[in-house]
Image: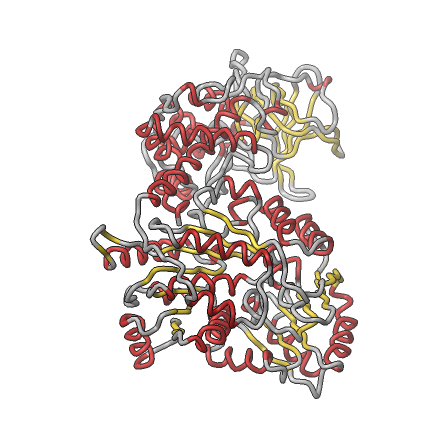
Amino acid sequence: MPTAAASPASAPPSAPARREKSMPQKAMEKMGLERDIDLALHLPLRYEDETRLTPLREARHGQTVQVEGVVVDSQISLRPRRQLVVVLDDGTDTVNLRFFSFYPSHQKTLAAGQRVRVRGELRGGFLGREMVHPTFKAVTEDTPLAASLTPVYPASANLPQAYLRKAVASGLARARLDEILPAELLPDGLPSLQQALHFLHHPPPSTSVLTLEDRSHPAWQRLKFEELLAQQLSQLQAQRERALLRAPALPLAQGGLHEQLLAALPFRLTDAQRRVVEEIALDLQRPQPMHRLLQGDVGSGKTVVAAMAAAVAMGAGWQCALMAPTEILAEQHFRKLVGWLQPLGIEVAWLTGSQKGKARKEMLARVASGEAQLVVGTHAVIQEQVEFHRLALAVIDEQHRFGVAQRLALRSKMQAEARRIEDEGGPLEPHLLMMSATPIPRTLAMTYYADLEVSTIDELPPGRTPIVTKVFSDAKREAVVERIRDEVAQGRQVYWVCPLIEESEKLDLQNATATHEQLSEALAGHMVGLLHGRMPAAEKAAVMSLFSGGQMAVLVATTVIEVGVDVPNASLMVIEHAERFGLSQLHQLRGRVGRGAVASVCVLLYTSPLSDTGKSRLKAMAETNDGFEIARRDLEIRGPGEFMGARQSGAPLLRFANLEEDIALVRQARHAAGLMLDRHPEAAAAHVARWLGGKAEYLKA
């Protein structure tokens, strides 16, 4: 839509509030532009050059130019559709200005005889050269040109650029941009924060646009360093605060429960599993809380490592809790842990939100008394009414799938347990072990996970077969069903995953219920099951039991089977509308097959047309089974905010820095953070408050 000097939307934000201004104000609040510093840090997406005029006779087709002249004709045309057509003469040539959306105020500004300054893309038209919906404003012959490049800010439909520019300029003028960082900690050659921000909002015409767009200009480098330093300070501070806390020291007893479990397991641990078990055991022996992430690819055997850690704690006379994001995953853990630990005299309790009444009360009583030494469940484990007897270790599986609120609730729960369980030295906080089948790329480990110790299982158990991944258009659907017939005829089992449960009017996707009906008809004589998140817990458990037991040939499911499901006889995974899934999710789903000795296949069915992102994801899946490479590409495609789920508070915590491109700045920020906390603690606190505010808490969650 065109803009004009007379447009009400361009009135300065400092003008008296009127009813028509409420929409831009609300739009600014929705974008988080409330404080002066928020406005100062709201940087342009791009710039327009309004510092020069281009004579029309010198302007080229396809070029975006600014011209100034007098309107020689202005009229409303009704053919082929209603539009305002204006002819502008700059003294060297004429150009037609065409507007399909316009107001009476625009007609007044663009009336014959008016002098206007116009900026837009010059293109060929039926009646000569034209600009469609250029920006414009009324001027006089002595109206000065802009002295700097004009910023174009991220905005919304109800927030015009003219309004936003004035608001940002006001915020930038008022914001306190005093230097917080000690000069000796700054990389060489960077401007002050105030200089950097003023430059980025109003760069002079001589500035290389390329250095602005690729963010290599020293002003951008200063902003990135400030942001990375705040993030590193927050993480390092959290790590240091945790080192001051106390936790139960859990010694390893000769012939203890951990050794009994190791001897009783029906398989040998891999070298990688043994290594991480030792790393965790060393942490548990210290009187400070462990804060460790256990990462390993799909099927690498993280559950048995968690069981060994739990055995160390329970062998020392303490309790453990294991929490998983879904009931299906929690139940898979529960079954395995019962099988391994119950013969050794350990009681494993099951606790989920679906438990009600007397059964729940009895379970809570067993947990509170200490009778239940290991408690397995969903987020119900961290609810207020759950009270442990002596909790020493909390294990969280697929921790990135829990929301911020749940992570903060877990931290509060652990702090509550610490206050309740004290010895002569004060509160004792439980140790924390987090597990993830989504490996963390190196740059993320240096930034968002800098406060964690990381253990990596980089070896798969023997006997796992490689999975072949094939990518097909949904036009090959019948051929895929034929392949399923072959698989089930040989006694093997198949997963078919759909993104929806029922039909959606908005998305034309193959849904789980319809697919279940179609496959049941196509595979008459074989049991085809349906599993989705809306089913009652007992019904889900019954379906999974039939599939795990081998009676069910095909399981049609939504992504509730993404993690935790372990059926070695399943040899084929079909993922419908694979282009709609994230890369890490596709890798997790693929990991449900290839768990036995039979060669396994994952079929990714897609619907055309594919977006560039969709193509990149499917290409990565077809090219590699390596979870670390998948994670690297996923970070590349999605960026850290989406990759990490809800560790952050809605918006990505890194707005300016790029983890892959700015690795040198990450290293400099890490080094500076330690020095700043040691030498300038007050400046460190002020810097974190300026950049992160309340979001610093989410980094620790």
Residue with the most extreme left position = 424
Looking at the image, which is closer to me, 436 or 555?
436
Please state the horizontal and vertical placement of residue 451, each as a whole percent of the image. 43, 43
Q: Residue at x 66, y 54 (%)?
A: 626
Relative to 164, say whether 386 is above or below.
below
Relative to 452, say whether 46 is above or below.
above
Please state the horizontal and vertical placement of residue 302, each as a whole percent of the image. 53, 61
Please state the horizontal and vertical placement of residue 683, each as a whole percent of the image. 33, 27
Residue with the most extreme front position = 254
Q: Which quadrant of the structure image shows residue 295?
A: bottom right
Residue with the most extreme bottom position = 525
Looking at the image, which is closer to me, 560 or 11?
560
Q: Can residue 462 be seen in this view?
A: yes
Relative to 459, say whether 556 is above or below.
below
Q: Which residue is drawn at 40% across and 76% down?
A: 345
Looking at the image, which is closer to me, 119 or 146?
146
Relative to 85, say whether 112 is above or below.
above
Please state the horizontal and vertical placement of residue 261, each as a whole percent of the image. 48, 69
Q: Residue at x 22, y 55 (%)?
A: 423
Q: Residue at x 51, y 64 (%)?
A: 303
Q: Is residue 163 visible?
A: no
Looking at the image, which is closer to me, 595 or 153?
595
Q: Is residue 404 left or right of residue 493?
A: left
